[in-house]
């Protein structure tokens, strides 16, 4: 059992295993009491990530196969499905329709569709989902393959249209807000569309940066403060709002 009550911060999409010292980053999440969803880019990384987080009260590990890696890791599709049966948290999964990855979309659809089917079958699954350049199709697939009783989708660093965002909201999706979304008009408009009871935050560290520096879970304090200022609320109120969302998500996964 992990703990949400005493959390001071949140990072619902972080690549803990891509930092130079993942074990030290887990310790930092515990020391600073940051609820962190450690996504993986290949299911082969799941056991080692679980070992790093085994004693952690704040770090939850997700089983994933990143859509950008499907072309080279297609053979790990079955391992992903087997791992989803053992892991209430799933991610990073999804579709990437941007030009460098468009060619693998047929295989991406196959892997993502199977991951959704197994998640729906098992139930109690929380999914951190990538949807760059493919938001409409990701939402179509969520709508077709999952129900909100059994699958809780979190759209990570969402960059689809307002129409897509509204459809996702109607389906019950949560959104993990990356600080980079506040850096452009489109991202800011999307953030304003999201109901407060669907708001989560993320860093996508160390892949995402602020300036030159890779983001990390402890940046969550600054991210909450910046997002609160943008939403014209207080840091304390926004922390309470995200804390309630975090609690719902972790309960859905049976993690608290
Ligand atoms: Mn990511």
Image: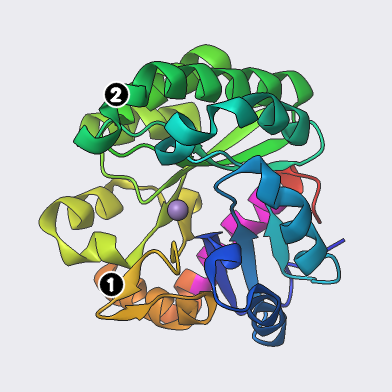
Residue 55, position in %: x, y?
86, 71
Q: Is residue 99 magenta?
A: no
**In the rendering, which numbered label is found on residue 232?**
1
Quarter holding the C terminus is bottom right
Nearer to the camera, 66 or 250: 66
The residue identified by callout 2 is: 103
- Is 131 placed left or right of 230 in the picture? right
| Residue 231 seen anywhere in this rendered image of the structure | yes
**Residue 37, relative to residue 161: is it above or below?**
below
Picture residue at 70% right of the left edge, 55% below the top: 61
Element type at mark 2: helix
**In the rendering, which numbered label is found on residue 7?**
none
Q: Residue furthest left?
A: 185
Q: Quadrant of residue 19?
A: bottom right
Q: Quadrant of residue 82?
A: top right
**Residue 88, relative to residue 108: is it above or below?**
below
Query: Could you give the CA–CA distance between mark 1 and mark 2, rounded to whole angstroms?
Result: 42 Å
Looking at the rendering, the stretch of residues picked out in magenta corresponds to 239-250
- Is 23 placed left or right of 230 in the picture? right
Main secondary structure along the magenta-highlighted residues:
helix
Residue 120, position in %: x, y?
68, 21
Quarter holding the N terminus is bottom right
| Residue 234 seen anywhere in this rendered image of the structure | no
Residue 86, position in %: x, y?
82, 37
Element type at mark 1: loop
Nearer to the camera, 47 or 90: 47
């Amino acid at each position: 059992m992990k703990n949400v009550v005493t959390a001071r911060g949140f990072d619902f999409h972080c690549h803990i295993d891509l930092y130079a010292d993942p074990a030290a980053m887990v310790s930092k999440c515990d020391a600073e009491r940051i609820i962190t969803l450690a996504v993986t880019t290949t299911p082969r990384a799941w056991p080692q990530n679980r070992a790093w987080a085994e004693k952690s009260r704040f770090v939850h590990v997700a089983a994933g196969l990143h859509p950008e890696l499907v072309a080279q890791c297609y053979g790990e599709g079955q391992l992903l499905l087997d791992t989803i049966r053992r892991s209430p948290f799933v991610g990073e999964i999804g579709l990437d329709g941007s030009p460098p990855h468009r060619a693998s979309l047929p295989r991406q659809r196959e892997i993502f569709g199977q991951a959704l089917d197994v998640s729906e079958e098992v139930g109690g699954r929380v999914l951190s989902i990538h949807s760059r350049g493919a938001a409409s199709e990701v939402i179509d697939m969520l709508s077709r393959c999952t129900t909100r009783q059994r699958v809780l989708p979190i759209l990570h660093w969402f960059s689809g249209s307002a129409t897509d965002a509204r459809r996702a909201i109607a389906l019950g999706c949560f959104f993990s807000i990356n600080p980079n979304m506040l850096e452009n008009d489109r991202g800011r408009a999307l953030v304003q569309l999201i109901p407060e009871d669907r708001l989560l935050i993320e860093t996508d560290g160390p892949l995402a940066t602020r300036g030159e520096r890779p983001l990390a879970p402890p940046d969550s304090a600054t991210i909450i403060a910046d997002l609160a200022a943008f939403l014209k609320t207080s840091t304390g109120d926004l922390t309470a709002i995200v804390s309630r969302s975090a609690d719902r998500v972790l309960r859905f996964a049976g993690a608290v």
